[in-house]
Image (cartoon, rainbow, N blue to C red):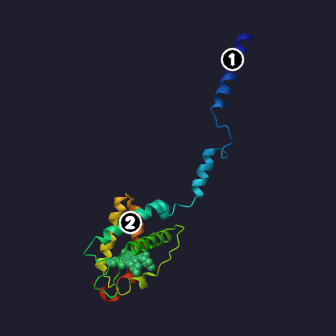
Amino acid sequence: MNRWFVSLLEITLTISFFAWTGCQPAQEPGDDAASDSLAAADTAAPASLYERLGGEPAITAVVDTFVSMAAADAELNFTRQGTANEWEATPASIDTLKTRLVQFVGQATGGPQIYEGQDMGTVHEGMSISNEEFDRLGGHLLAALDAYSVPAPEQEELMAIVETTRSAIVAADTTAL
Ligand code: HEM
């Protein structure tokens, strides 16, 4: 091999080496941005149901729709006319009910809200609520969740929470219905 050929070979190898190293990650493996974000994803807590529902704005919108649907359903008798605990629906009492429902759902789903209302047994006492009526209200809640395109897994999680209130809400004398 003559000197000219050896020099050409050296130059070619040098250029190839730098071209190759230029394509490699600039940082040490395990120290780059991609592995940092993977590590963060591994340790991050899963989003709460509250966050997945869309937080307070989304819950407020669902509660507004749900209360309007319930109030308009004569068969549900939401105001409990003819029972020992009739409820007077006024703009102020409806506002309070909505505020409490948002607090209730917020607190139950992992949000920062603090529920300031009464416990489920006390507030619904004397309203003679049947299982059928409980289910009917649940149907309105599902329809409101659908109206805001809440995905099925989040709907199911919320309905499971609502279900935990059934025994306190449904009157003892109507549980066979
Ligand atoms: C599906 C499960 C239910 C849940 C989670 C629920 C939850 C609540 C909450 C958080 C309040 C506010 C309590 C307060 O302000 O202290 C409330 C009030 C009320 N609920 Fe329910 N409820 C349910 C079912 C029902 C049903 C089936 C009816 C009637 C058919 C009903 C009728 C009422 C009425 C009339 C009030 C207003 C009471 C008042 O402000 O004095 N609820 N409910």
Quadrant of the rendered image containing residue 176: bottom left
What's the mark number on residue 64? Answer: 2
Where 125 falls versus 72 (above or below)? below
Indicate the position of residue 77 as horizontal and vertical percent values: 28, 77
Say whether residue 2 is left or right of residue 176.
right
Q: In the rendered image of this protein, does residue 75 appear above or below residue 142?
A: below
Q: Secondary structure at mark 1?
A: helix
Observer-nearest of 81 and 33: 81
Residue at 46 percent of width and 82 percent of height: 119
Residue at the outermost right position: 3
Three-letter amino acid code at the position of disc 1:
Leu
Which residue shows up at 35% across the image and 87% down it?
126
Quarter where residue 75 is shown: bottom left
Whether residue 172 is situated above or below residue 67 in the rendered picture: below
On screen, 125 above or below 24? Answer: below
Q: Which residue is mark 1?
A: 9
Q: Residue at x 27, y 72 (%)?
A: 73
Query: Can residue 93 be seen?
Result: yes
Disc 2 crowd, CA 10 A, few/some/many (<14, 14-19, 20+)? some
Does label 2 or label 1 sit earlier along the sequence?
1
View extreme (front): residue: 91
Q: Ligand 1 lies in which image quarter?
A: bottom left
Q: Disc 2 vs disc 1: which is toward the camera?
A: 2
Work out which residue is located at the far left of the displayed protein and give it.
75
Number of residue marks: 2
Name the element at disc 2.
helix
Q: Nearer the viewer, residue 82 or 154?
A: 82
Identify the residue at image location x=33%, y=83%.
86
Looking at numbered disc 2 in the image, what kind of residue is underneath it? Asp
The quadrant in which residue 67 appears is bottom left
In the rendered image, residue 70, in percent from the top left (x then y), is placed at 32, 71
**Closer-to-camera residue (97/36):** 97
